[in-house]
Amino acid sequence: MNYDDIIKTLSDKANINSRTDTATKLSIIFYNKEAWKSRIIPGLSPMQFETFMEFVTYRTPWGLGWTDQMLKAFILPEEKKLWADIESELPELYANGENPKYQPKVEGITCNTSKLGNSRTYKIKKLKRDAPEYAEKVIRGELSANRAMVEAGLEKEKVTIPVDVNAFCNAIKRKFSPLEIQQLKDLL
């Protein structure tokens, strides 16, 4: 089976049989960059991809048309090296308005069409740009992307609280100092 046949099978979600078979095919494609870096489809414009994630998330027939969550779901737990390799090749996030793909067509008009996000991929790109040492820790599996964003000072810590008065009170007691609890009482 050649690379184009493997890519065609992976892009047709109905043909995906087993997780092990799919992970093997993804690994074959990832480590053979000539299979996905430049995609030439007869009768269509050629496409160039800088990263595997860009190729995976791009629409078919050039890419696989998957989400990054779908990709991770098919990579087996024992394939940690493959996932780390995929994440390590992610580029850092552009500063607002600097992405060359989204430059305005008319001079004097600025637009920011870059996606904001809460996904692991977005957070790794942002960490690569603003706190590279934390990005490496996330890729190596030492920290979660959320914890790294908080420790790097790029996000405030968040608390998920069930809609229940007792659970809410317990969460406040766990996360807030006595002074902050008093400030909360004053605000209520």
Image (cartoon, grey):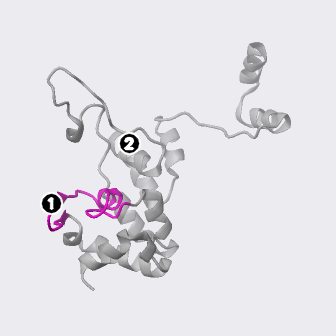
Residue shown at 44%/60% (left/top)?
140
Work out whether 28 lies above or below 136.
below
Residue shown at 77%/16% (left/top)?
188
Residue shown at 16%/31% (left/top)?
105
Q: Which residues are magenta?
A: 38-65
The reply to whether the magenta stretch includes residue 48 is yes
Instruction: Give the secondary structure at mark 1.
Output: loop
Q: Position of residue 106 (x, y in %)?
A: 15, 26
How far is mark 1 from mark 2, CA to CA? 29 Å
* Pointers 1 and 2 in contact (C-beta within 8 Å): no
Q: Position of residue 14 (x, y in %)?
A: 45, 73
Work out whether 19 lies above or below 174.
below
Quadrant for the N terminus in the image? bottom left
Foreground residue among 171 and 22: 22
The reply to whether the magenta stretch includes residue 54 is yes
Instruction: Examine the residues drawn in magenta and state their main secondary structure.
Output: loop
Foreground label between 1 and 2 = 1
First of labels 1, 2 by sequence position: 1
The residue indicated by pointer 1 is: 46
Label drawn at residue 126: 2
Q: Is residue 16 left or right of residue 183?
A: left
Callout 2 environment at 10 Å: few (<14), some (14 to 19), or many (20+)? many
Work out whether 27 lies above or below 179.
below
* Furthest-bottom residue in this view: 1
Residue type pointed to by label 2: Lys
Residue type pointed to by label 1: Pro
Residue 114 sits in quarter: top left
Foreground residue among 148 and 114: 114
Q: Is residue 67 left or right of residue 44?
A: right
Q: Is residue 122 left or right of residue 179?
A: left
Residue shown at 21%/22% (left/top)?
109
Q: Position of residue 176 (x, y in %)?
A: 71, 30
